[in-house]
Image (cartoon, helix red, strand yellow):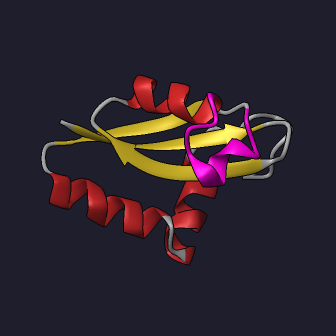
Amino acid sequence: MYYIYVLYSEKHLKSYVGFSSDVHRRLKEHNNKKSNYTAKFAPWILIHKEQYETLDEVIKREKYLKSSAGRRWMKKNIKWPRSSTG
């Protein structure tokens, strides 16, 4: 199984979309500054995840969520923390 996930940094008002077979391990890596891009925006919280059976499906979904249409979908369909506009 693979998961698409959306992280949110309340401190920096930033979001991040990624995928992994182990979302909780990946969240720990982001918060322990093991990822170059996300290190400077820690701490992160998990605000959304979706499950997919194949790598192809999860990569397709990640590309969509990173597009302008996907960002609009996230703003409309994900419950964002109060300090965010999505």
Q: Which residues are magenta?
A: 32-42
Q: Residue at x 62, y 28 (%)?
A: 32
Q: Residue at x 73, y 31 (%)?
A: 43
**Quadrant occupied by the N terminus:** top left
29 or 51: which is nearer to us? 29
Measured from the top left, where is residue 27 in percent x and y? 52, 30
Q: Which secondary structure is most common in the magenta stretch?
A: loop
Q: Is residue 80 above or below residue 45?
A: below
> Residue 7 location in percent, x, y?
59, 40
Q: Is residue 5 left or right of residue 42?
A: left
Residue 22's x, y, as percent?
A: 33, 29
The residue sitting at the left extreme is: 54
On the image, which quarter does residue 20 sit in?
top left
Q: Is residue 85 left or right of residue 15?
A: right
Task: Verify whether residue 38 appears in magenta.
Answer: yes
Relative height, residue 34 to residue 38 (above, below):
above
